Image: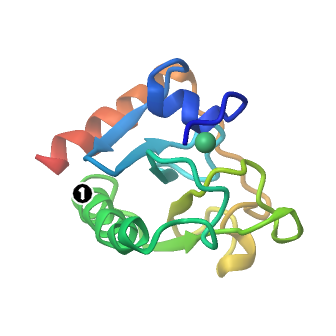
């Protein structure tokens, strides 16, 4: 059920703009508005669920295949050197928006350190794209999704 105060529900409804790169019946994928790296994306179920514990299995089963589809598109377009797939559940784990989302974070050598520790918070590296640059990254990924 849609939650009135949920930013991701508003994005799903189209009430808040986002750089959408993928959509199907159950899920959308958008570029993170505050990306850690070029191509940092979020897989978001259309249906509101606070976290993985609340997410119905039938939807959860589609999250990784969609993430993989997007990663394949990135592989051909952004050509990162690796990927971190990060998903935090509940405040203590660092979850900030309480609507399930899976981070796809392309990793590039020399940009912020290795390992999951630096996936969301790169060490000594800050990626601060302009709005137009984000739009362009979205376009490039979409062009490879077919
Ligand atoms: Zn929501």
The picture quadrant where one finds residue 138 is top left
Q: Nearer the viewer, residue 82 or 65?
A: 65
Q: Is residue 40 left or right of residue 59?
A: right
Residue 114 x/y as whole percent? 65, 79
Q: Is mark 1 within 8 Å of ligand 1?
A: no
Which residue lies at the image location 70% right of the left edge and 61% below the top edge? 120
Q: Is residue 146 left or right of residue 34?
A: left
Which residue lies at the image location 78% right of the left edge and 51% below the top edge? 96
The picture quadrant where one finds residue 70 is bottom left
Q: Nearer the viewer, residue 81 or 54?
A: 54
Residue 108 x/y as whole percent? 51, 65
**Which image quadrant shows ligand 1?**
top right
Q: How many marks?
A: 1
Give the secondary structure at mark 1: helix
Residue identified by numbered label 1: 73
Q: Is residue 143 left or right of residue 1?
A: left
């Amino acid at each position: 059920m849609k939650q009135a105060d949920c930013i991701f529900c508003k994005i799903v409804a189209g009430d808040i703009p986002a750089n959408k790169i993928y959509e199907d019946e159950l899920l959308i994928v958008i570029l993170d508005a505050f990306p850690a790296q070029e191509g940092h994306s979020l897989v978001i179920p259309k249906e509101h669920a606070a976290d993985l514990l609340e997410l119905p299995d039938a939807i959860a089963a589609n999250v990784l295949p969609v993430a993989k589809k997007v990663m394949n598109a990135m592989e051909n377009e952004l050509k990162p050197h690796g990927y971190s797939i990060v998903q935090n559940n509940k405040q203590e784990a660092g979850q900030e928006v309480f609507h399930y989302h899976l981070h796809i974070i392309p990793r590039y050598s020399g940009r912020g350190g290795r390992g999951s520790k630096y996936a969301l918070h790169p060490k000594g590296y800050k990626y601060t794209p302009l709005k137009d640059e984000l739009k362009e990254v979205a376009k490039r990924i979409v062009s490879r999704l077919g």
